[in-house]
Each structure stands twice: as C-alpha cells, then as structure tokens.
Image (cartoon, coloured by chain):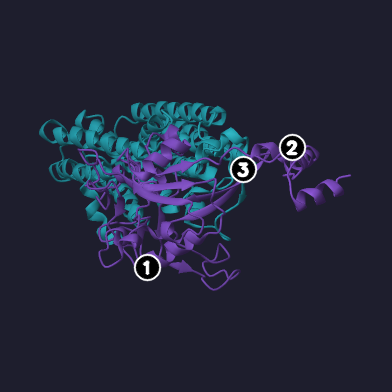
Amino acid sequence: MTSLPTIAPTKKLGLVIDLDICVGCHACAVNCKEWNSGGHSAPMTDWNAYSGTESEDGDDAGAWGVWFNRVHTYEAGEGAESRTVHFPRSCLHCEEPACVTVCPTGASYKREEDGIVLVNPDTCIGCKLCSWACPYGAREYDYTDGVMKKCTLCIDKIYNENLEEVDRVPACVSTCPVGARHFGDLGDADSAVSRLVSERGGYDLMPEMGYKPTNKYLPPRPRKVNAGDTGAPTKLEALAAEAADAVPSNAGGSGFLAWVDTMLSR
Amino acid sequence: MHPASSVIFFTTASGAGYGLLFLLGLAGAAGLVPAGLWFGLIGFALAFGLITAGLLASTLHLGRPERAWRAMSQWRSSWLSREGMAAIVTYLPAGIFALGWVLAGEARGFWGVFGILASTGAVVTVICTGMIYASLKTIRQWRHPLVLPGYLLLGLYTGGLWMAMLACAFGGDATTLIWVTVIAGAAAAAVKWTYWSKIDTQIPVTTSGTATGLSGLGRVRMLEGPSTSKNFVMREMGYRVARKHVPKLRTIAVVAGMVVPFALLLVAGAMGTAGGWIPALLAALSGSAGVVVERWLFFAEATHVVTTYYGAEAA
C-alpha cells in the first residue's frame, strides 16, 4: 500500500550527520555498499566495475553502479572566508515521502513501526517514477535487476539479534572513523540524537519541498579565524611577561636556597 | 530530465489515440459523421492502435514489464496507477461503441451512450497522464499549471488531425471537424508558447544553498562529486538540453506541429471528399512530428532539484 500510514509513526528511526566533523573519507559509502551487497537489497550491481575508461554500454565511459550513500564535497563562501564541507547524502526517510505515494504498485512503502522507507524488490516494476519524485537523489535504479533500490537504514542489521547490541546500527554509522554519524529515534525528544539536533541546530535539507525528512544535518561550527577565538592569547610578548611574573620566587624565604637566590639575583 | 524515447512515444501516440477516441465518441453519438463500416474500421483501428502501441511502449520503459499488472493497485495515491486503471476501463465502453458502429452500423442512441462514456474515459486517462508530471514537486517545469491543459489540448488536436482525415476520406461534417482541430491546435500553440515563456522566467526556489543547508556560509558550489563517472541519478535526472538549440526546437515544434498542418487542413477542407484525405494525412503526420519535438523538449527542458547536489546552483 503506497498510501502513507494512517497513523503517523511515533518512532522515527534516522540519522544525524555532523557536517562539522565529516572528513569526506567515503568510508560510510563504502561500508554501506559492503553490508548491503549481502543484505535486503542485494545485489548492488556495478557496471564496467574494473575499468575506468571502458565503454561497454556505448554512451558512457567508466565504472558505475548502485550506491545508497554518496559523499559530495562543497565549497561555501568566498576567498579566505570560504569553507570546504564534506556532505554525505542518503535516503532521509521522510515523514511525507512522495516517492512512496507515487508508486503505482505498492512496492514502495513506509513502515508504520519505525518510519523506515523501503522498496519490495518482488513487486517493483522498475518504472523509476519514485526516483523522479525524490528531491534528494536517494533512489538508484538497478538496470540488471530491473528494480529500484535505496537505503534500508540497514534494517537487516539494526534489528539483527545475532549481532552484539553495540553493532545494531547502520553500517555507515558503525564505520565512521570520526563519529560524524549518529543513529537513533528522532521521534523521541529525549533520545541522544534528538538532543544533539536541538543543541547543535540540526536542520532539514530542502525544507521548501515539504517532505519532512527524518534525517537531520548538523551545521559546521563557526570558524575560529582569530587566535583569540581558540582561547590562545593574541600576543606572545604579553604572555611572556605574564609568565615571568608567574614564576615562583624564593625571595623572602629562608635557608640555603634563599641565600643562593638572593646572591644570584644581584 | 532524460528524454526516454519510449515515454515520448507513449505520451504522444496515446495522446493522439485518446483524442481521436474522444472525437469518435462525441461526433459519432451526435451524428456528425456517418457510422459507416470503413469509417469505423479505419477510425477504431487508428484509435486503438495508437492507444495500445503507446501503452505497450510505456511498458518498455519498465524494468519488469511482466509485473505491469501490479500498477493497477495503488489508485488511491498514485496518478500512474490511476492512469493505468483509466486506460483499461476506457477499453470497455470504447470496445462496445466500436462494435455498434462497425457491426450494427449505428453510433447514436443506445450505442451513443457508450460513445460518450468512451469520450469521458479518454479525457480522464489523459488527465491522469498529465497529472503524473504535474504532481511532481521536484520538477518546477512540470509542476506548472499549464502542463495539464497542454496535454489535453495536444491530445485533442492530434486526435482531431486524424479525425479530419477520416471525415475527408469517408464522409461526414469535415468542415466542423477541421475547425475544431484548428481551434484546438491554435489553443495548444498558445498554451505551449505561454508555458515556455513562463518556465524561462521562473525563479527556482531550490538552490544548492537550500539543498545543503549551507547558504548561511555563502554561495554553495560543488567542489567534488561523489563518483568518478555518471551515476543513475545524473543520467536520469541530470540531462540538459543545449540551451542554444531550445528556441530553434520550439519553433520547429510549432511550425511542424501547427502551422504546416493548418495550411494542409485548409487544402483538405477545400478538396473535401475529392481526395482531401491526402493533405489531411500529411497534416496528421506533420502535426505528430511537431508534437514529438514538443514532448522531447518537455523532458529535456525539465530540471530536477536533485541536480543542485550535482553542481547546478539552482533548479
């Protein structure tokens, strides 16, 4: 059924991605491909996989394939003030996903229990209309399988009781070497991810589209341009003088060391 | 958007087929054309042929055509599903009406009711086709309010071109049908011309700034893409027509689609049943070619907001 759940899911599983921390290493995208190549939406087909130039399909050169997670790099601002921001992009598991309502077969659906948006590969007819309806480019068509594929939020990992509890998070989250990706229930205002979003001003992508994405992005923190902003002193001379004053002196003391100090200070 | 030839053929062929079915139903029920054997045979062969060829072509666009029947199930939410339903349902009254016309030699009265139903079904189906595009918020050129009128008028117009040919060949009120066709064609040209000038001056709401949420930092542009070669999203949604060709193609669409057919229809009207079907046939062919160019532009000119993640600064 491609109508959205009549009762909006209270549990909203999703990701919070910290653009301040992401270093653009693509590990999340690679581990996503690794896990999902054997998971719910397997295979994640590649074409011309071993060639950078071979033109097998006639119109385009190079290796390409199905990925659920892709890392872009943007530059924002001008000149010395500009920032380089690495930007991982995957399905946002929207609260009002148009990709689901346009589906003519019911293959695309939003789960009532946790809000995850999935494609049933057994009923998808490969019309690609959902990929036209998604503003985020989250859905990628598998030309070999003839069906649409997308991020499952690692549904076969997060509920997998054969795994240690600590490992029951999406592959992209468990692999991130810098801790830029967080997974949790964004429907629960007290969850760690919800608190993170409210503390850091997490935001929606393309809010003007009105699809109410569940995943949130944390903005890069303000740049610290001046040395003083980091807590360091602006001038070293002042520091040196301060430091000299701060050196403990034995002047006024007594005993042998005090006598040495007095003699040397002359 | 990538202009897939199967979808261009589907929308233009079935549009003309439903336009012709609409006119056969109304003109037949109103007694504007004789319910003759040859008129019926050629007319319904053309209408059903165009509709069915279009629908079959649209299944070529599918990755799993053998599952196409599943598309009937989600009419509550999906315009594509509604279109499939409407297309199938329309075959019923259209088939009965065709039988009455061809076998019983009657298109009015009892049989005419099925003609009106077939005409209604034709309109509903084309509305669903147009709404598939007009309902997509992600593509501002398709979300435009003139998209649906464009689909309806071009369907009526191209169907009218075939209907005029039939009336010239097999008798009937060719003059009225030619006028209906010319008026529909002129209206379609006006709608398309207005549409083109509107989409040229639209100010995109979505930018690389809203897409990334980084606009507070300044102008946002892509430094590095996510992949070394074009991926599915870039192939399907990233297609861009060469800007310099657009004005030429628009002119070709209107000249081949409307101007040339109008002139040929004038000749056909003057010749009437004395061989008028030949210029009318040429008018239909030229008009169809023009509408194919129009439909190609409809896809190629459409910019999808996802391109703002891939280097476009607005879409």
The chain painted cyan is: B
Q: Is residue B290 visible?
A: no
Q: Residue furthest right?
A: A266
Assess disc 1: are there few (<14), some (14-19) or many (≥20) residues with their C-alpha within 10 Å of its C-alpha: some
Percent of width and height locating residue A44: 40, 65
* Residue A58, horizontal then vertical, whole percent: 54, 66
Residue highlighted by disc 1: A43
For this view, does A75 lie left or right of residue B166?
right
Comparing A47 with B168, the one in front is A47
Looking at the image, residue B78 lies above or below residue A62:
above
* B270 vs B8, nearest the viewer: B8
Q: Secondary structure at mark 1?
A: loop
Q: Nearer the viewer, residue B195 or B221?
A: B221
Q: Quadrant of residue A34?
A: bottom left
- Say whether mark 1 and mark 2 are on the same chain: yes
> What residue does disc 3 label?
B221
The nearer-to-camera label among 2 and 3 is 2
In this rendering, does residue A216 appear at all? Answer: yes
Mark earlier in primary sequence (2, 1): 1
The verdict on a common chain for dots 3 and 1 is no
